Amino acid sequence: MFTTIEIHNHSCKPLYLIANKTRPQAGCRMREVLLESRDDRQHVYLPEKCIGCGSCVQICPKGELIIGSVGAVARDLIDKDYIEKRRSGACVLCALCASICPTGALEVRTAGKAEKDESYLSVALQPTTVSDKCVHCGLCLEVCPQSCIEIRDRQLSQDGSLRVEGKTIIDLNRCVHCGWCASVCPTGAITFQKPFSGEFFRDDQVCQACRTCVHTCPANALFNKEGKAGEIVEKVTHRKDACIYCGACAQACPVRAITVRKTSIVPEMKGKKAFEKKLSEPAPWPTLTSCLHTDEKACLGCGNCVIACPVNALFDPYLAAGHLNELEEKPLLEVLNGTVRVVNQEVCGSCATCSMICPVEAIWLERREVA
């Protein structure tokens, strides 16, 4: 089992709810997971900083890191973290995973001090800053997908001028560099830099509109349009200007309808070309790190989970349309003798859509041990 360490920073304020996942506000204690310790070096994971992008898994030369259940974790419907580590002992603590992490969620420490230099993306990224042009209007605060902006001491000017005084503060420990704040700023007071440029593709024929990607995206770059009566709209709309091309949506998609390719690293950093070459390759699919459980006594046999399950829906659109009892074969979930049954655990996409729709909490996901 992993060792969990808790550290305290400053006074703790209430939690924000971000994309159905609670994340600590500035000043809260931050949980740390000790992935491995060897002599005076430690491999440490900070789950609250992690966005589930899987860049670390993609870059690891030993295949030691595992990502899974991204959608369920983002929705706060499973008790686990995005990232786990194998116990094979093959890790050489090369720190490549920590170097490529855009949010600094992974660290390699020597004698308790994190190794960070110009080869780390989180260090090379220019911090999001606010200049004196800021009028403290609060638009940036309203649109920030991570709720990492606050305005302190906001009040009308005391010198007789028609101004608003205050201090706009961005918590750089939680900023994902999406640029929402800079885009809406009426005075151009905010500057930022994205970690990656890239390409986003969603296969509309495969997508089941389960909203897992929408709930997972750390930058609010995906959303469902509200169509008018009789209007046909795309299942998921991509906001290119907000996207940081991290790939969390692709890691979360239970039917693999999304592909994200990182074409370049935006900041200048040591070893940039080597990192870009590795990241240009297709990212590995997430590992199945969850297991479906059901409560036969609580189950009503309504079949909502069977119909809503994206894996089932992809298998046969007729089932997705609500024809529960007219199809004998189902890949993942079915109702048998008045209660839900798991047909094949191995095809589960770990999105927890079934848990969300169940009216009596009769189906849920639990963490699966991975060797």
Image: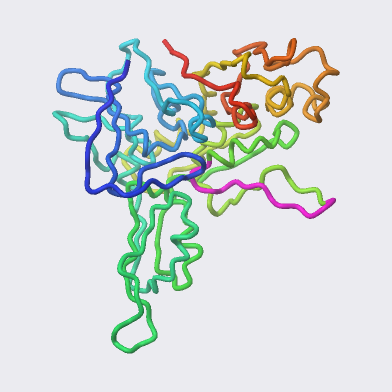
Q: Position of residue 187 (x, y in %)?
A: 44, 73
Q: Is residue 225 highlighted in magenta?
A: yes
Q: Main secondary structure of the magenta part?
A: loop
Foreground residue among 350 and 260 = 350
Foreground residue among 284 and 155 = 155
Q: Position of residue 51 (x, y in %)?
A: 44, 38
Q: What residue is drawn where x is 46% and y is 55%?
A: 144
Visible in this render: residue 256? no
Determine whether 48 is above or below 111 in the image: below
Q: Position of residue 361 (x, y in %)?
A: 58, 25
Visible in this render: residue 220? yes
Q: What residue is drawn where x is 33% and y is 53%?
A: 171
**Magenta residues, start to end:** 217-230
Q: What residue is drawn where x is 85% and y is 51%?
A: 230
Residue at the far front: name it: 297
Q: What residue is drawn where x is 37% and y is 41%?
A: 103
